[in-house]
């Protein structure tokens, strides 16, 4: 089979870091090749080089035997390579048609030929079963529709080779299945696809061939039907990292209870009539497709938003309209979902980041003056106990790697031994080793009697840590299921909002 | 072309970059002086001589620096919390206007000196603060960007001053000139050095700069306002109330500018006119940026600007180079310092 | 009351509206173009000043009036490129850069003006644009002189509104410009370089602003003096918000604004119980009011003030 796309010996360094080292990859006509690797393995860098956003230090890219000039983003598109971005590259205030058309005609032409473009879009949409409304504003579309627009954008530019960067990150498993069907239809139609993912089951179900990337190098290449999940997992992770085991829960009294909480949408999604309760020594996992209200739920318990109606009880006290300092004083520890945007202030020192959220306490200030020594000591202790590497109390927190930053945030939360912990996406973007560390700490906290509210999009993580699991869909919480009974299909149904089906299935299992 | 953040921008690089930038700005200004047909070397020598060469020059430079320190502080305090107060010019004028108005009240004029001065300064600070709280309120309530509103208010206040000095507060003894009634004797700032215009406003301004430095680096409020400026979302997450922090920041910032106006009237001019400020408020923005928003740096940057203005004045009298060269040099310094701070933090890659 | 009606009934005020509006139209279109690609341009006040000075100086040195406009536009573009270099290429603070450009452009204008005209008690004058006389049209009653008795740059400004509105919504370039201000990543993914496009738009926008300044010295007045722009640039920044970033509405805003300005100028002469300064305050207060009314309603370009760096999100 002649390759339609060839990457040969690609090497790219950023300062001292090597993002890609001698990476080679071939893609045949009508083939689906998976590029498998953990976060930070160099998948995105490789694709950025292909698209000319970065210039490789060494190596060549060939499309249909033609070498692409380095550093020219239009070259790849002209050669028929299309990219479906992980974070949609769409302009929300423009229409679907405008998003698809932009940049496809010479900028200096005097007319934009909307009618022609619309016709072409509709033909493509028909042919691949990707239904869209051309005049709808992208801001009004669902996540699934946005993804269809992304794919159509590439097809509109006459892509013969399509690269999908973690396309299922924002989809339910049912939506993902339908995407896979589309992908197969496209490959049968002669398109060649590269599917980038770190999820093993997806890679196994969709691709013909798998290329595994680790620390910027190709560590293995397998034909999908001749390999297994376990083999791929080992290739991807390298040395096996053992995630901590969970001991059975010993639930205590109810520490956190929400009753009929309604939160209006402001920035995030709204919450509708949400009730939940959480006991000491117990972990409640909240799963769901992003954008369904989990962010708002986390903010609510963290004291950042206030409900319109309903009550929030903490250890039997009404904390419905408590602000952040009261929430913290009440013993709620908070791990924010985005550590760079919310968890820390990059240009402030590590000790300031440690002290800021408790700066009002006697420990860190007296009569409005900061007790710098006390704060620095506290930071020093966290750095030591939580093994934060590369950190100096007076250094800026920006200099820490993601994993070490998260360790520091974890330390900041756990050091005060909170009775309740809200952990939102606690291991997002971390490597396996760091994830295991975070999980161990959260399990330890539960075991010593803390109530943990875990909000995560990583199903494996939720299943590994939680005692009970609930899904959040459209701002509503599903009934809880015990973690032992969780399986992929059941969780998928819960996340899709088919709670009656899920209930039935669970009942059947229970019998 | 791409930019990479330097992992550890060294202390020397961070310190030297702004100085190098000012040097570049001076070289560029030198080219303009050459275009104007004078020798840049001679021009700079004369500028330095004019600003520092004599007792009179030195005292003039320090006198000029006094309001600049305060307007520089006003901008530095606000910018640190990302409150874009471009209205220091208006706050300066309003603060100045308050002094003769207050002085017209018999009980203020009857107060003993220090009390009268304190009273006037507090009133001026209040006026400046209120003038900034209004646009801040519009931002917090309606989401109106304060850059444009504070800018526009500068023009409104200037017209208000014009109304007053031609109307209600016009000095009947000024032979028809549009100037306000004078500051009462009790509120005139005592001179520091005999036979010069240098007054106690300078130590007050320096003291305020040190106080602001202490507040920003040592107090809970300072830490919160810095957090609010650097990363509002994270500050909110840590329980910092953005609205409350910004209100206090606005009071400090507007207050400093107001006090600057009061001090200029009480210490130098003695009465208010529409041309009381040769752009002190706008220069304050430049000074704050030159100082990298550091209150102590503001003192140095204010001295640099004052040097340029006073020195260029005397230089242009001798050399026929328009004295606007000082404004050009200061504006060039602002842009080149902005660039140098960036280059100290980033590395350019292909 | 009759005095008010007299003012509104006079041809003079309606003639003045278009004349007062012209620099605002230029300025607002320029700022609008910059903000549509995602860059706040607070350099406008200084660029207008420099446009006023450079246009005037060209004519004073013996150049043609249109050459003056051209020179002003080119100078504006140079300052625009400098602004773009800082804010787009380097991604530096748009607030500070804009103010820096304003200070630099304004002080350079005064410096160059003083060099060229060292000592003159009264500012020297040039022979400015005259009202064009379109046969027949200009003789129409009322409308004739209001619409067809303006100077040529006014018609240029009106033409620019049409061109920009068409380009923005009906051409590939306009679509790219709008996308650069909404989501530069999306534009980059489509194969158009947002950085180059932003630089281009800022240069073009700044050129247009400078024309607004040149109109002041070459048509509205016949001389240059410091502080003559008098905050018109800042008013344009407010008008862009009022116009919701749409060229046609920018024209409407500028006309409305000019009408109030013309009206208050005439009202001053009639009402002498209120200090005239209060009338002069009206334009600034109106701008603030316009901002308050529109701030929440307008559809702000999503990427306004967000620098674009490849590979960073």
Image (tube, grey):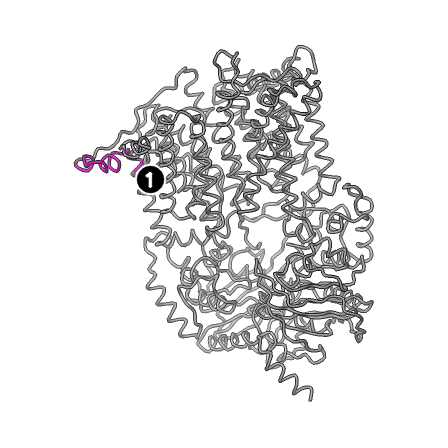
Specify the quadrant that holds the C terminus of chain A: bottom right
Per the rendered image, the range of residues in magenta is C136-154
Q: Is residue A181 left or right of residue C160?
A: right
Q: Secondary structure at mark 1?
A: helix
Residue A347 as seen in the image, left or right of residue A447: left
Q: For the stretch drawn in magenta, what is the main secondary structure?
A: helix
Q: Is residue B306 above or below residue A369?
A: above
List x then y, in percent, for residue B15.
68, 35
Q: Is residue C294 above or below residue A24?
A: above
Res B291 seen here: yes
Q: Position of residue A55 (x, y in %)?
A: 55, 55
Q: How many marks?
A: 1
**Residue A461 visible in the picture:** no
Name the one closer to the observer, B151 or B158: B158
Specify the quadrant of the image occupied by residue C137: top left
Q: In this picture, is B264 found above or below B76?
A: above
To which chain does the residue with label 1 belong?
Answer: C
Which of these two is toward me, C133 or A507?
Answer: A507
Q: Using a 10 Å C-alpha cutoff, classify the residue at mark 1 as few (fewer than 14 neighbours), some (14 to 19) or many (20 or more).
A: many
Q: Position of residue C116 (x, y in %)?
A: 41, 21
Residue at the limit of the structure toward the left, as seen here = C136
Queried whether the magenta region covers residue B326, the answer comes back as: no
- Per the image, the residue denoted by label 1 is C157
Residue C150 in the magenta stretch? The answer is: yes
Q: Nearer the viewer, residue A71 or A284?
A: A284
Residue A56 in picture, x, y percent from top left: 56, 57
């Amino acid at each position: 089979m002649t390759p339609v796309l060839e990457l040969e010996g690609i090497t790219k360094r950023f300062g001292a870091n090597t993002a890609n080292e001698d990476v080679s990859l071939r893609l045949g006509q009508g083939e689906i090749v998976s590029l498998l690797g953990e976060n930070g393995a160099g998948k995105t860098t490789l694709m950025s080089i292909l698209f000319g956003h970065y210039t490789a230090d060494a190596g060549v890219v060939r499309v249909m035997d033609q070498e692409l000039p380095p550093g020219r983003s239009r070259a790849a598109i002209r050669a028929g390579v299309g990219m479906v971005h992980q974070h949609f590259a769409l302009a929300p205030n423009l229409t679907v048609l405008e998003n698809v058309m932009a940049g496809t005609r010479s900028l200096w032409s005097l007319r934009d030929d909307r009618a022609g473009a619309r016709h072409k879009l509709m033909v493509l949409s028909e042919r691949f079963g990707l239904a869209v409304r051309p005049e709808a504003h992208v801001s009004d579309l669902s996540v699934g529709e946005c993804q269809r627009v992304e794919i159509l954008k590439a097809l509109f530019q006459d892509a013969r080779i399509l690269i999908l960067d973690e396309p299922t990150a924002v989809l339910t498993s049912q939506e993902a299945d339908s995407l896979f069907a589309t992908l197969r239809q496209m490959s049968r139609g002669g398109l060649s696809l590269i599917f980038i993912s770190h999820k093993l089951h997806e890679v196994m179900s969709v691709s013909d061939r798998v290329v595994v990337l680790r620390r910027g190098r190709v560590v293995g290449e397998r034909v999908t039907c001749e390999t297994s999940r376990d083999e791929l997992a080992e290739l991807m992770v390298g040395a096996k990292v053992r995630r901590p085991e969970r001991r059975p829960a010993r639930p205590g009294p109810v520490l956190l209870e929400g009753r009929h909480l309604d939160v209006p949408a402001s920035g995030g999604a709204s919450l509708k009539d949400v009730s939940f309760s959480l006991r000491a020594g117990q972990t409640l996992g909240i799963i769901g497709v992003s954008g369904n209200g989990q962010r708002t739920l986390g903010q609510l318990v963290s004291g950042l938003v206030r409900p319109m109606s309903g009550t929030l009880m903490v250890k039997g006290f009404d904390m419905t309209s408590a602000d952040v300092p009261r929430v913290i004083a009440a013993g709620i520890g908070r791990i924010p979902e985005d550590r760079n945007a919310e968890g820390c202030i990059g240009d402030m020192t590590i000790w300031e980041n440690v002290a800021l959220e408790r700066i009002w306490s006697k420990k860190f200030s007296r009569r409005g003056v900061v007790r710098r020594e006390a704060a620095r000591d506290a930071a020093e202790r966290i750095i030591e106990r939580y093994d934060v590497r590369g950190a100096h109390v007076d250094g800026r927190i920006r200099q820490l790697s993601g994993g070490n930053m998260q360790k520091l945030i974890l330390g900041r939360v756990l050091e005060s031994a909170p009775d309740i912990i809200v952990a939102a996406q606690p291991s997002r973007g971390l490597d396996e080793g760091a994830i295991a560390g975070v999980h161990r700490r959260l399990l330890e906290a539960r075991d010593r009697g803390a109530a943990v509210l875990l909000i995560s999009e990583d199903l494996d993580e939720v299943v590994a840590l939680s005692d009970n699991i609930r899904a959040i869909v459209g701002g509503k919480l599903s009934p809880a299921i015990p973690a032992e009974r969780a399986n992929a299909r059941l969780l998928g149904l819960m996340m899709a909002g088919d709670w009656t089906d899920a209930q039935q299935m669970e009942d059947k299992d229970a019998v | 072309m791409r930019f990479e953040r330097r992992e550890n921008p060294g202390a020397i690089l961070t310190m030297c970059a702004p100085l190098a930038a000012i040097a570049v700005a001076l070289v560029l200004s030198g080219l303009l002086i050459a275009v104007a047909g004078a020798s840049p070397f001679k021009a700079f020598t004369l500028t330095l001589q004019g600003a520092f060469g004599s007792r009179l020059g030195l005292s003039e430079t320090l006198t000029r620096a006094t309001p600049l320190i305060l307007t520089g502080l006003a901008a530095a305090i606000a910018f640190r919390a990302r409150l874009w107060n471009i209205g220091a010019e208006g706050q300066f004028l309003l603060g100045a206007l308050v002094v003769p108005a207050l002085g017209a009240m018999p009980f203020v004029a009857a107060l003993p000196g220090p009390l009268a001065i304190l009273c006037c300064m507090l009133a001026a600070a209040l006026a400046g603060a209120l003038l900034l709280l209004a646009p801040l309120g519009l931002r917090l309530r309606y989401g109106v960007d304060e850059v444009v509103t504070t800018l526009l208010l500068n023009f409104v206040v200037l017209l208000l001053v014009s109304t007053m000095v031609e109307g209600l507060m016009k000095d009947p003894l000024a032979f028809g000139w549009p100037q306000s009634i004078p500051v009462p004797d009790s509120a005139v700032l005592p001179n520091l050095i005999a036979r010069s215009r240098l007054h106690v406003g300078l130590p007050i301004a320096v003291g305020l700069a040190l106080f602001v430095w202490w507040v920003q680096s040592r107090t809970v409020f300072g830490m919160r306002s810095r957090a609010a400026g650097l990363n509002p979302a994270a500050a909110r997450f840590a329980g910092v109330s953005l609205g409350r922090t910004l209100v206090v920041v606005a009071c400090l910032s507007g207050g400093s500018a107001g006090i600057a106006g009061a001090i200029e009237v009480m210490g130098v001019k003695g009465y208010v006119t529409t041309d009381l400020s040769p752009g002190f408020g706008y220069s304050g923005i430049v000074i704050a940026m030159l100082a990298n928003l550091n209150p102590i740096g503001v003192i140095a940057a204010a001295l640099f600007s004052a040097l340029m203005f006073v020195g260029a004045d005397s230089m242009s009298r001798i050399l026929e180079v328009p004295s606007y060269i000082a404004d050009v040099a200061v504006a060039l310094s602002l842009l080149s310092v902005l660039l140098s701070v960036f280059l100290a933090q980033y590395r350019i890659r292909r | 009351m009759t005095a008010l009606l007299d003012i509104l009934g006079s041809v003079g005020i309606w003639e003045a509206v278009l004349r007062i509006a012209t620099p605002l139209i230029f300025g607002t279109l320029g700022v609008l173009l910059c903000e549509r690609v995602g860059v706040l341009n607070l350099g406008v006040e200084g660029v207008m000043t420099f446009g006023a000075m450079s246009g005037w100086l060209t004519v004073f040195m013996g150049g043609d009036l249109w050459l003056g406009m051209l020179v002003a536009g080119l100078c504006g573009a140079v300052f625009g490129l400098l602004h773009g270099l800082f804010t787009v290429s380097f991604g530096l603070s748009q607030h500070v850069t804009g103010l820096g450009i304003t200070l630099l452009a304004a002080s350079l204008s005064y410096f160059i003006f003083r060099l060229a005209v060292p000592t003159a008690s009264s500012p020297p004058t040039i022979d400015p644009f005259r009202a064009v006389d379109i046969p027949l049209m200009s003789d129409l009653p009322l409308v004739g002189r209001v619409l067809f008795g303006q100077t040529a740059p006014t018609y240029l400004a009106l033409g620019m509104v049409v061109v920009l509105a068409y380009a923005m919504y009906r051409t590939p370039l306009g679509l790219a410009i709008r996308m650069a201000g909404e989501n530069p990543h999306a534009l980059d993914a489509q194969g158009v370089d947002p950085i180059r496009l932003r630089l281009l738009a800022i240069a073009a926008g700044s050129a247009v602003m400078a024309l607004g300044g040149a109109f002041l010295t070459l048509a509205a007045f016949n001389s240059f003096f410091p502080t003559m722009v008098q905050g018109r640039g800042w008013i344009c920044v407010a008008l862009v918000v009022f116009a919701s970033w749409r060229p046609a509405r920018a024209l409407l805003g500028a006309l409305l604004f000019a009408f109030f300005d013309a009206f208050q100028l005439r009202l001053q002469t009639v009402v002498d119980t209120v200090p005239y300064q209060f009338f002069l305050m009206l334009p600034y207060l109106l701008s603030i009011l316009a901002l308050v009314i529109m701030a929440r309603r307008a559809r702000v370009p999503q990427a306004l003030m967000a620098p674009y760096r490849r590979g960073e999100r």
